[in-house]
Amino acid sequence: MPSRKDLANAIRALSMDAVQKANSGHPGAPMGMADIAEVLWNDYLSHNPADPKWPNRDRFILSNGHGSMLQYSLLHLSGYDVSLDDIKNFRQLHSKTPGHPEYGYTPGIETTTGPLGQGIANAVGFAIAEKALGAQFNRDGHNIVDHYTYAFLGDGCLMEGISHEVCSLAGTLGLGKLIFFYDDNGISIDGEVDGWFTDDTPKRFESYGWQVIPDVDGHSAEEVRRAIEFGRANTDQPTLICCKTIIGFGAPNKQGTESCHGSALGEAEIIAARENLGWNYGDFEVPDDIYAAWNAREKGAAAQKTWNEAFAAYKSAHPELAAELERRMKGDLPANFAEKADAYIRECQEKGETVASRKASQNTLNAYGPMLPELLGGSADLAGSNLTIWDGSKGINKDDASGNYLYYGVREFGMAAIMNGIALHGGFVPYGATFLIFMEYCRNAVRMAALMKQRSIFVFTHDSIGLGEDGPTHQPIEQLTALRSTPNMHVWRPADAVESAIAWKSALERTDGPSALVFSRQGLPHQDRDDEQLADAAKGAYILSDDSGRPDLILIATGSEVSLAQESANTLREQGHKVRVVSMPSAEVFDEQDAKYKQQVLPLDVTNRVAIEAGYADYWYKYVGLDGRIVGMTSFGESAPAGELFKYFGFTVDNVVSVAQELLDN
Amino acid sequence: MPSRKDLANAIRALSMDAVQKANSGHPGAPMGMADIAEVLWNDYLSHNPADPKWPNRDRFILSNGHGSMLQYSLLHLSGYDVSLDDIKNFRQLHSKTPGHPEYGYTPGIETTTGPLGQGIANAVGFAIAEKALGAQFNRDGHNIVDHYTYAFLGDGCLMEGISHEVCSLAGTLGLGKLIFFYDDNGISIDGEVDGWFTDDTPKRFESYGWQVIPDVDGHSAEEVRRAIEFGRANTDQPTLICCKTIIGFGAPNKQGTESCHGSALGEAEIIAARENLGWNYGDFEVPDDIYAAWNAREKGAAAQKTWNEAFAAYKSAHPELAAELERRMKGDLPANFAEKADAYIRECQEKGETVASRKASQNTLNAYGPMLPELLGGSADLAGSNLTIWDGSKGINKDDASGNYLYYGVREFGMAAIMNGIALHGGFVPYGATFLIFMEYCRNAVRMAALMKQRSIFVFTHDSIGLGEDGPTHQPIEQLTALRSTPNMHVWRPADAVESAIAWKSALERTDGPSALVFSRQGLPHQDRDDEQLADAAKGAYILSDDSGRPDLILIATGSEVSLAQESANTLREQGHKVRVVSMPSAEVFDEQDAKYKQQVLPLDVTNRVAIEAGYADYWYKYVGLDGRIVGMTSFGESAPAGELFKYFGFTVDNVVSVAQELLDN
């Protein structure tokens, strides 16, 4: 029977071998946290390697994602579909074992980690989702949503600001089934952390209302075990287990120093480490008895079987709830959603309201919300401005998590990364809001949603200089471009209530990535559309008004500038020009259309094009080319009433007409 | 003699009147913090309204910048060039009193605030600058750099993650002359903060090593005074004064609720507040005795005179030091810098080294650094990767702040915002580094540097898929576009060691905004240049290789793709085509050149253009138009060795030639 140390050493050996073979990677964290991981995975983690998507599995997140070989070793050893060849392919193109854990590349990876601090934010999202889903679906005697969320993290995660945002909120929400393991090894890339990181971390987490287990020897299985028991027993508070460890444990000359953090140990040190650890096996060699002790397939199958039986009992007692839970975990929308949403969109078209698109967004939530109990909304302390609360919104708090709305506080980055965790958990479609400018505070989490192909819906209001008096710090300019240039991101900037409802429908129906819904503060006039235009609006860009025959000029606009384009077109038409107006609420969705449709909307031979958008001008060269013109922003904004700003920056019929005239006169 | 309450009520009255007149703004914070501000400004703040740039003034920062009327009231009352008309123009176009305090718009505003948490980060930067400058310049008996930095902040600032990053670092660095006033009013925009913010804030700050003065009645001048005394007496630790206040203090029906946070009180409530406060004066009326009691011109002139005398004594004892301090506070580079930098650039050209541009950056620091004691470098825990430490680097720590290098820890956002504070303080040119992808973590501070026109130099290394095995979480794609689309930002992506040295020179000489220097992880081949090309490289884009006569094709490239463009051009030339290669290290700098130069480099009639850059492709429509082609990234990256990735994503001579061929065949 192998000892616990032998089991942990298997992780160490695989990690140092894989990093050495790739000649790239981070052996320090896997070797330092191997003992902790061994106890957690072998004694506590409830999971089934044969079914990595089993809904009630415990979630395990490696927030210090650079230590990816720790997680790959665990997956391989415990019986996931991660082979020794996969391990040998560490960090190679299209392998199952990329440099950092990547969601969707490897069975058992719950989230993509590497950008520090976000893994623990995702973990908080997982724990919120578990608590809220349980509160919505569990019934007396039927705890069918009931799992822990465990995360590993290092000094880097704790220095990052996002750790403050999400751990503070986790304390407030009393996430009792969230357990963090802090790898307190005293080393970061620049060396011993004493020079730049002197927090009393236990005290800090106590200030957030966490249970803290300090001074745990991270190389003592017994101490780690006892700490986990404390963590699991306390269901009112999240738990931080502070584990003192030695980075690169086992490498006799490099352990305890930054030299083993981020590069291969080298052949000589690996030989010395093998000897030091008493690991008398070849490269990538793990003896059968160690494999056998690690293998979790049998235990996992039994755990899942027990749950399956519990779920069957639940299903027979609460058939509708069970069916609904199954639907939500699959991520399917209700069968009649598309039809009812289309009806609402037509209703908006008929109603013809002039409202701010942020208000139109709220109206849409009121229309779609009752159909979608999976919606889990929120705002970073701007609910009254973002208009994210609809009639069916109910706050989630420590004592009652059955609601569908999170008061995130002034924590934009935390919000976005928590949303990603909620989306990854399943059972919910998260939406969360802030001002468009503060997209920048949560920027990398928005990108991570795109990278992980998650249905996180980001609501960004106050979308231009139309925000007015708050001034340049609050007026977005280049933010639309930043969003649009993000791979796999859909950005919608609707022109009126109709396009707002279409944008929401598209975001909700999208299953392979996030959407950013960008709404105005100020009122936007309604636009006329026939049925064909209504259908085409969902294609991201469409002809909103036109004259017969080949146009002399195309005006392309989005959002609040569409009505300006329409008025300008009318003036130009009075002057005898044939003008087409193209409304382009989503450039990315338009780009995905077939060539024929794109040519129909923007014929290549019409080079007289003017793009109009109160955002970064140069983005629009993509659609107007070097022969066109752009009415956009080329500087920061100013503090003044919105109407004055639009005039000051040239968003007037006069200016658009005169810019168009330059082209028409050529 | 007016009472302290009367003095504070002058702030309240001006604030509610100005917000009412603008029908926009935030009366709650100014009314809540008026008593604290009155004590600080009248009893402690050392400043001279007649000379807002007096170098040794105390710095005052309103981190909860939405309460801007508090600061405008203080500036007006104490005698700055902020008139009653300016106050009445609150939030109007081009007024001195924009919606949020904007650096450069108003005398006495030390930094632009509004984006929450960044004001306190700037304040930490001010305090670091004061401590480091003092350590470098003060001599026995001559404390000529010796001032406090005070900041006001609210719940929002404390919820933001950046507050964790910078307050943790401030504790580590023992910034004893930094004093924060926390406006603990229990209210944020969404209502009572209990639902989303339950931190034990005193305990949290104690965990950072701060002195905390808890439970101060923010409406008791005596308690505030005593707290400030404690703060000033403790020179080893920064101090947090926790002031219990009532938001909107004095408005009888709205105080203590979120309804007075962010909108005008309304006529009726203002009348009631006047009565409640015993403020029997008209709109915007302040009686003379209250003006007289507030006026700080005489006291300020005396304080500055005392300092001037002290500085004269210092100057006579240490003439060279004094001259150097004056130069540095003015922000002038040494007189011979340009000449010596040019000599180094020519030396690089002659040497012809093939090195990674991050290494070329470090070499440049070693060349320029000895001339520039004002350089204050750092990295967010990636010194060994960013190569930001040069031979003259010396760490700054709690006990010895005379160095020129900050170990920022894993705190990108904190770093960038601290850099802005350092730049604003004067005496230093800050540079700070992280991976280009983690620009996103500090994104809004980078933007704020551009908005404030500060010489913050952001060093971003590992600039593309060339980063290799770390994979898509670490490989920038759209980040160059995000930087380039930021108004007033200069972005440099050099092709070799020569362009790297030119980029550093440009960033250092620029006095009206920040620069982002974007460097490669991998080695970049040297390019040949004659003297004219060497001079033109500083113009942002230039002809690197050409054939005689009008080119059939122009290849535009930056950074690591310039050598690919050169090789591809050679292949195309062998096929008989006339090919020009344009290296464009800085598109923004090129855009600033005159029309003639631009036409010379990129003649409008040559529409066969191919842009090559391992970043977001569509940015390049700006230079190639709809008739050109782009070899760029249209997806996220992958984890693999860099060489494989460049091949996989089409950055090969074969691909560039075949793309060019499509144009040439037309």
Image (tube, coloured by chain):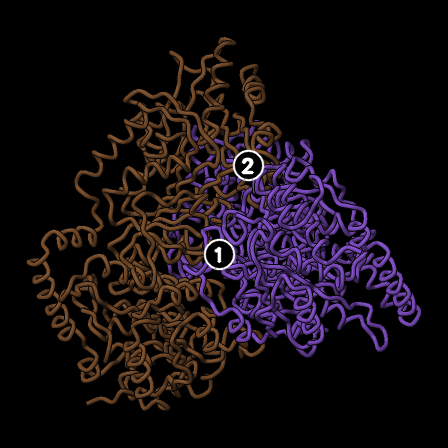
Chain colours: A purple, B brown
Query: Are dots 2 and 1 on a single chain?
Result: no
**Quarter occupied by the N terminus of chain B:** bottom left
- Which label sits on residue A437? 1
Task: Return the residue nearer the eye: A353 or A391.
Answer: A391
Q: Amino acid at mark 2?
A: Ile
Picture quadrant where residue A195 is located:
bottom left
> Does the image show residue A583?
no
**Can you name the residue that lies furthest to the left here?**
B316
Residue carrying label 2: B465
Tell me if A230 is positioned left or right of B118 in this view. right
What residue is drawn where x is 38% and y is 65%? B170
Front label number (2 vs 1):
2
Residue type for callout 1: Ile
For residue B527, which quarter of the picture? top left
Q: Is residue A661 above or below residue B221?
A: above
The residue that appears at 48% across and 77% down in the rendered structure is B203
Q: Residue furthest right?
A: A316
Tag 2's secondary structure?
helix
